[in-house]
Image (tube, rainbow, N blue to C red):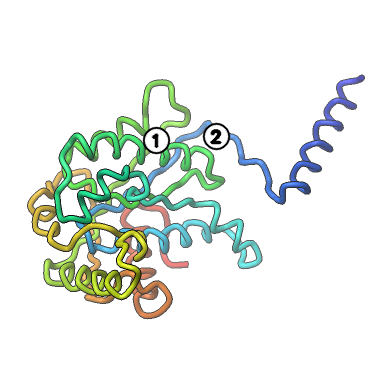
Amino acid sequence: MTAKTTEATCAMSSTNDEKTTGRTNPPPPSSRRARLVVLTGPCGSGKTTVGRALSALLGSIGSSSAAAEAAAAAAPFLDADDYHDAAAKLKMSKGEPLDDGDRLPWLARAAAASRDAAAFSPSHVAVLACSALKKKYRDLLVEVANEAGAVPAIDVDFVLLRARKESLQARLERRQEKTQRSSGAAEEVAGHFLHPSLLKSQLEAWEDSEEVMVVENDDGGDEDDESGAGGAAARRTAEAVLLAVGLGGKQ
């Protein structure tokens, strides 16, 4: 079999696989530098809602409206809450703060997943929602994202979504009310399971550091309302994040 025939056969096999599965193979990892935007802050700061809005905005940069699905996939969004183990989720649902024994393995899992997401993303950008309250936690995210030999190198931007304590508390109380109206499983409400009583300890744990940019997200709205006013507010905040990290402006 000639080289050309081999290439044609491989290409045909790949096309047939895509038709059979309905999916295309992921792109190879970028050999260039990639970006990871980490939205930080305590519970109720809007990391998840703004993160999803930011992912959509990043995916729309340079894309036509006809490619909406491809654009959305171009900037993956990850929520660090998804990488907690069952024991940590149970502690938080009871109002028990996590210690470093809980947090460090969790952060390493979230950072590794984010690194892969950014490397294989067509846009070479990924968004992570993660409280990352202390500088050592943020340093760990950068370290794991750029482990020895990893390709590409990952530039990590940290953005604090800042809001007044009163706004954070009001959001958490609304979230708890939704939980109580549901089956009672906190995990079922917008993926959140952190008890409102932990807000005080999270605010006390926050450490400022020079690598963190600040974007205000204090409109007092419901950060879990992504379809109405909450969604519009999240998009405005996401646009401000884009400007802060230098990835673009309003679309």
Amino acid tagged 1: Ala
Amino acid tagged 2: Pro
Q: Residues within 10 Å of mark 1 (few under 14, many from 20)?
A: some
Residue 100 falls in image quadrant: top left
- Among the two numbered marks 2 and 1 on one chain, the one whose residue lies closer to the N terminus: 2
Which numbered marker is on residue 29?
Answer: 2
Task: Name the secondary structure under disc 1.
Answer: helix
- Above or below, 112 against 232 in this view is above
In the rendered image, residue 205, in percent from the top left (x then y), is placed at 10, 48
The structure residue drawn at horizontal position 22% and vertical position 75%, both measured from the top left corner, is 220
- Above or below, 71 against 177 in this view is above
The structure residue drawn at horizontal position 33% and vertical position 63%, both measured from the top left corner, is 240
In the rendered image, residue 1, in percent from the top left (x then y), is placed at 92, 19
Which numbered marker is on residue 112?
Answer: 1
**Is 206 left or right of 226, judged from the image as shown?**
left
**Is 228 left or right of 216, judged from the image as shown?**
right
Residue 35 falls in image quadrant: top left
The structure residue drawn at horizontal position 30% and vertical position 60%, both measured from the top left corner, is 192
Task: Name the secondary structure under disc 2.
Answer: loop
In the rendered image, residue 238, in percent from the top left (x then y), is placed at 36, 63
CA distance for labels 2 and 1: 14 Å
- Which residue appears farthest toward the right when viewing the image? 1
**Is 236 left or right of 124, judged from the image as shown?**
left
Q: Nearer the viewer, mark 2 or mark 1?
A: 1
Q: Residues within 10 Å of mark 2 (few under 14, many from 20)?
A: some
**Cβ atoms under marks 2 and 1 closer than 8 Å:** no
Q: How many numbered dots are placed on residues in this image?
A: 2
The structure residue drawn at horizontal position 7% and vertical position 52%, both measured from the top left corner, is 204
**Is 38 left or right of 210, judged from the image as shown?**
right
